[in-house]
Amino acid sequence: MSNNNSGCLSVLFPFLKLTGKQHEECQELPNIEKEKLPYAKRDDFLSPSELSFYKVLRQAVGEEILICPKVGLKEIFFVKTRDRGGFSTYHNKIDRKHVDFLLCRTDNLQPICGIELDDTSHQKQSRIERDNFVEEVFETSNLPLLRFKNRVSYTFSEVKESLDKVLNGIDIKAAETAESISGEELTIPICPKCGIPMVKRTVSKGENKGKEFYGCPNFPRCRETVDVEK
């Protein structure tokens, strides 16, 4: 046998050396720190005037009402049209707008009133148009909207007086609406909130399993229901 045959290992040796060298180079790579996201907690979540108003508002509403600051309109309202084009148009109109404060019930967190603090920027034409639109949205949805001038300080009496005018009438109005709905004789009822025909559904579980009722097609954004008359 010829001595020139150095064996299979001699053929693989250069590759093994190269692989080993590459492995060493990989181990010598410096550690790359993960880039930190450029965020920080704001110290001015509420401006001084907003904080001043909040403290007075907290005293005026008591423990029966929850105060939610800076709530987006899209979290309060929904577009009830089922047309896709119309939905996109009207959803975009409320997508980036918010109210300074939203008052909600403590038992079910249902919104009962919006509050806006108007500073000097609200005198600009663009802001006037924005404010008019927001007021129309609230009015269309039967949700009150109060406006206060943005100031350094507020008095308890002025805030309480404005709130009482709105809050004292909410329960009465709700009772009248419920009575008028229950007195209507409908074959296929119209959703009182969305103005579209309701659909018949059946309770699938619980104590009322098997019970039929009419529900809004926009559920769960709209939870209006009407019992099926037997």
Image (spheres, helix red, strand yellow):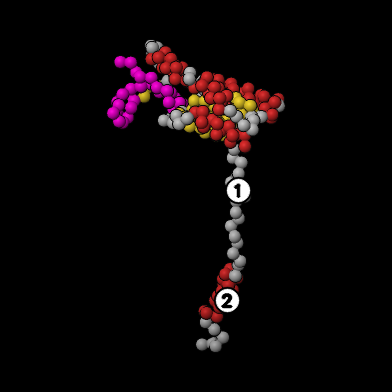
First in sequence, mark 1 or 2: give its number.
2
Q: Label 1 belongs to which residue?
A: 39
Of circles 1 and 2, the one toward us is 1
Question: Could you tell me which secondary element the residue under label 1 belongs to?
Answer: loop
Whether 185 is drawn above or below 101: the answer is above
Quadrant of the rendered image containing residue 149:
top right
Q: Residue at x 59, y 64 (%)?
A: 31
Quadrant of the rendered image containing residue 133:
top right
Quadrant of the rendered image containing residue 72:
top right
Distance (Cα) linking label 1 and label 2? 47 Å
Q: Amino acid at mark 1?
A: Tyr
Whether 131 is drawn above or below 20: the answer is above
Judge whether residue 112 is colored magenta. Answer: no
Q: Residue at x 52, y 82 (%)?
A: 7
Q: Position of residue 141 (x, y in %)?
A: 52, 22
Which of the image's four quarters has the C terminus? top left
Q: Residue at x 28, y 28 (%)?
A: 207
Q: Is residue 149 visible?
A: yes
Question: Could you tell me which secondary element the residue under label 2 belongs to?
Answer: helix
Whether 151 is drawn above or below 139: the answer is below
Q: Label 2 belongs to which residue?
A: 17
Q: Which mark is residue 18?
A: none
**Nearest the camera: 202 or 63?**
63
Q: Residue at x 64, y 33 (%)?
A: 152
- Residues in magenta, as a range: 202-230
Q: Position of residue 71 (x, y in %)?
A: 55, 33
Q: Position of residue 227 (x, y in %)?
A: 35, 19
Badges 1 and 2: C-beta atoms under 8 Å apart?
no
Q: How many marks?
A: 2
Q: Is residue 81 visible?
A: no
Q: Amino acid at mark 2?
A: Lys
Q: Is the magenta region chiefly helix, strand or loop? A: loop
